[in-house]
Image: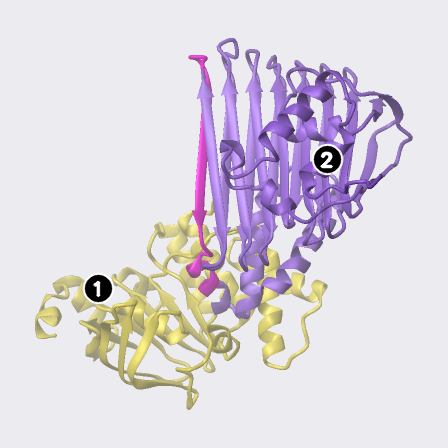
Amino acid sequence: MAVLEPTSTEEQILQRFKNVTGWRKDFAERLKRDGLPNRRVEGWKWTDVQRAAKGIRGYGKVQFQCSVPPQWTEVKRSASQDFFANLLAYAGVQSVPYIELSNWVKIIDVDFRALPGVSHAALTINAGAGETIRIHEHYSSAEQAFSAIGVDYVVGKGARVERVVLIDEAPEAVLLLSSGVTLNEGGEFVQTVVSQGARLLRHETQLHHAGGGAKATLNGAYLVGNGLHSDFTTRVEMHGPGGELSQTAKGIAYGGGRGVFQGKINVKQAAQKTAANMTHKGMIVDEKSEIDAKPELEIYADDVECSHGNAIGTLDEMALFYMQQRGLPEPEARRLLVESFLDEALGEISHERTAGTIRGLISKRLKGLA
Amino acid sequence: MLDIKNLHASVGEDGKPILKGLDLSVPKGEVHAIMGPNGSGKSTLSYVLTGRDGYEITDGSIAYDGEDVAELEPEERAAKGLFLSFQYPVEIPGVPTLTFLKEALNAQRKARGEDELSAPDFMKLVREKAKLLNISPNMLKRPLNVGFSGGEKKRLEILQAAVLEPRFLILDETDSGLDIDALKVVSDGVNALRSPERGMLVITHYQRLLDHITPDKVHVMSAGRIVASGGPELARELEAEGYDKYVRAA
């Protein structure tokens, strides 16, 4: 009997979901019905996965390395983290590596590398009450890899998690990277994501914020060129009173690159005294490039301080002239200006060497731009 | 040192003519002042001299040390020693002042075929010059001009001149935004840069700056041309009588 090979990425994904039950079955049916997200779906209108995934087939796999040995546990889903990218990642794995942070672990390095073909991976990190931890995550998919990777966090009461995500994909890779974050009272979650795009890249964070003095910082910098695509999407639900949120996203598109920023803050009625601000600034270097942004605030509490701002512009010609007037050649001045533009989004990386590595990477990429 | 002949220049996409036959000659070692009402083309002249994009020379010539510099890039003119102290120094977030100054100095030195200055030599040079201008080391660590007061920005412009050691300085309304004390500090800094080898063009609306920086010559600019020239007494006359008669004459 002939075995029929999948003819599309969707079919390839669905093959993995044959005979699944429970929430996986529900998800598989949803995927079968709606297909992969595409431009007709509001939250994906600028990031058409269906189109980008075309031609990627075959079983792939994700190589995973972690500086501490994780435990493995069965996948459990909470109804609050039910967004597509995260479900796709978790539905495709049977068990998930699980890191329970304890006193002796202070720094964790995590590395994900997706190989060609369609793959799924997931990781769950639980920072117990009062723990302080820094996590560096590195992603580097190969060409023709389509992967959905989910990394979920639970930040316990009074715990502090600093997360740095460096996404350095091959130009023909597709990566849907998602994080469901649960931030408990008095906790702190500080995230910085740095991306250089891919054929399609989406980094999506859904954060449930308990309030009660907890603080979340969601920063990101993207530098996307040469026809690549980078999408930062965040959704924050402020549930309890007295929570703080700060968001700074900055990005540059050049050489036909496309940047996408979608940020939504939802302040529930109970979340009085919330202080939340969101800023996105984009720089479009040439006419071939594009940045699309949609910052949103939805507020149901009446005693809050919330703001959102969005500005898209081009390189400041006066600043360029000023630097040239002091003797810097134009390409050098351009590089310095672009670097300094992104730098604001990197300010929360406390580890100097990590920040230095990221700045070096950006600088190297910018030499091509100059 | 600087010889401008029949300079015509236009600005922007619509090519609006601003400079209309300007003649000016500043010999080595002299300080000349240009005064004039708003819109007479003073700042345009400073941008044309330093090569800002969008400022088109349509006729005439600019000779600097006998060389036509009209076709050179801004950074090439800077390396040859042309320095513009901006009326509104630009804020550049994310670039520490010291880093910027070091990159600028070494870029100029490289363009002139000189060796780059080592970090300790650079620091020694900056510290020495900064002290004279009342600039704290802390200020130099901050991003260039970001959050600086008007006075701090202008002092920093003069510090940059002191470190880069240009051969010709154009000061575009250096006195704007300065209180009396800051005006004195900045003027002292400028006076310290006066030398027989260096020329200066001081652009200003008011005579008060020229009380501190005494010019060898004063020129009145109106409608894109120099319409009168004289000694320092001309500045005092303008202060007393205004620009009216020159505007009407132009």
Can you give x and y, in whole percent of width and height, for residue A20 in the image? 77, 22
Can you give x and y, in whole percent of width and height, for residue A354 in the image? 75, 44
Q: Residue furthest bottom?
A: B66
Chain of the residue under label 2? A
Q: Amino acid at mark 1?
A: Gly
Determine if the magenta segment contains residue A306. yes
Determine if the magenta segment contains residue A326. no
Q: Which mark is residue A13?
A: 2
Residue B145, can we see it?
A: no
Would you call the spot at circle 2 few (<14 residues within 10 Å), some (14-19), or many (20 or more)? many
Image position of A141 with respect to B236: above or below = above
Q: Which chain is yellow?
A: B
Would you call the spot at circle 1 few (<14 residues within 10 Å), some (14-19), or many (20 or more)? few
Q: What range is drawn magenta here?
A: A300-322
What residue did someone put label 1 on? B39
- Classify the position of the N terminus of chain B by image quarter: bottom left
Dividing the picture into quarters, in which one does residue B36 lie? bottom left
Q: Secondary structure at mark 2?
A: helix
Q: Amino acid at mark 2?
A: Ile
- Work out whether residue A232 or residue B78 is closer to the camera in this orientation and state it: A232
Q: Residue furthest front?
A: A1
Residue at x 65%, y 31% (from the top left corner): A85
Tags 2 and 1 on a common chain: no
Q: Is residue B139 left or right of residue A300?
A: right
Q: Which chain is purple?
A: A
Spatial separation of the CA atoms under disc 2 and disc 1:
68 Å
